[in-house]
Structures are given as C-alpha cells and as structure tokens.
Amino acid sequence: MKKVIKTIFKIFLLLFVAGIIFIAWANYSIKKNSDAYISYNIADIPETKTALLLGTSKNLSNGFPNAYFYNRIKATIDLYKSGKIQYVIVSGDNSTKNYNESEDMQFALIQQGIPTDKIFMDFAGFRTLDSVVRAKDIFGQNKIIIVSQKFHNERAVFLARKNKIEAYGYNAEDVNKFAGFKTNLREYLAKAKAYLDLIFGVEPRFGGDKVLIP
C-alpha cells in the first residue's frame, strides 16, 4: 500500500512540475511572439480601418469604478481622434440581463465623441479567443488594432495572429500593481489556456450572421 501511495505521489508531483513548466513556457512564448506588435506609443501603431475593444466590467465587485474599463475607453478615443482607426468593434460579455460589457463600453465611447454608426457591437465576445476570431469571421476584418492593457494584448494579439489576422495591440494604461495583482495572476493561467485552445483547435462558442463594416 505504501508503494502505491508513493507512486501516486510521484506521479502527482511530476504532473505538478510539468504544469508549472508549461505555464512558464506559455507565458514566455506568448510575450516573445507578440512583443513586436504591441505598444503604448500611438505613433508605433499602423493605421487600419477597425479597432477591436476588448470588454471588461464598468465597475468592480465593490461598486467602485474599474480603471481597466476607463483606461481602455481613453485608449480607443485616442486612436479614433488621431485618425488611426475609423470604426470600433466593441466585444464583451452580456451573459446576464443586468450585465452587458459591450453596451457599457458603447455608451462610454459615444459620450466621448465617437458616433454611434462608427461602433459595431459583438455581444458574443465571452472570451478573448471568441472576440478576436469573430472580428475576422463575423465582421470580416483581416487587420485590426486590439485595445486592452499590455498583459491582455499580449495574449489577444498572439491568438489573432495564430488565426491569420494581422493584429496589433495598443496598450491602454495599466492599473497599479497592487490593485491589479489578482488580474495579473489570472493572466498567467489564461496564457497557458490560450496555448491549449490552439493545440485542441477550440473555436468561438457562437457563430452568427455576417456584419458588414463599410
């Protein structure tokens, strides 16, 4: 019995170590492969027709404003006003009646001066993979600028390019390290999951009718 327990423990330990190595490798690889295509400097970003704004909640669970949300809105406004983009696809989660990331972001963009007819809504962007693939498959965009924070853009641009989309990332201002600790910790696992999605050929959960962006 002791030998069986030892064997099980050794297998568990090996799997645990292998998992840690895979997570570390996935994070390094994704950062390395996306680094040349993302920037905080708007001058580094090429002009293209459409930006993909990745969704997040307007408020935190404690009711306070979510800095990630407002910083992404500002970055998108900066792109639009600089002439780098003409249209915005707003992609986010609307899984419950009272939670709609896309509508919150659309409203914030309109308030800041982007016309309604320049904003296209993707209500099925439940995951980053879904958002980037649907930008191509549903909205017909083969070249996009993705707007999010740097840690998120690394993964989004990587996934987009692996799906044959010419993607660039404009990094919105991040939040302080303490406030964003949990988010950044989750991102380590999310990057590993992104690699697994590619390995297993995971596709967006929902399809839909094509949407024409002029």
Image: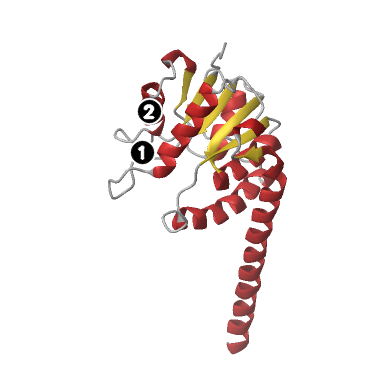
Q: Residue at x 39, y 21 (%)?
A: 110
Q: Amino acid at mark 2?
A: Ala
Which residue lies at the image location 65% right of the left edge and 34% below the top edge?
Answer: 168
Instruction: Determine contact: label 2, label 1, CB under 8 Å.
Output: yes
Query: Mark 2 or mark 1: which comes first in sequence?
Result: 1
Residue 154 rendering spot, x and y as whole percentages:
62, 44
Going 59% across and 40% down the picture, which residue do you hit? 40
Residue position for label 2 = 108
The label nearer to you, 2 versus 1, is 2
On-image quarter of the N terminus: bottom right
Query: Can residue 207 be seen?
Result: no
Count of labels in the image: 2
Please tell me whether residue 153 is drawn above or below residue 43 in the rendered image.
below
State the separation of the CA atoms marked 2 and 1: 10 Å
Residue under label 1:
58
Circle 1 Cα neighbour tier, 10 Å, few/some/many (<14 / 14–19 / ≥20)? many
* Placement of 43 over or under 17, stated as above or below: above
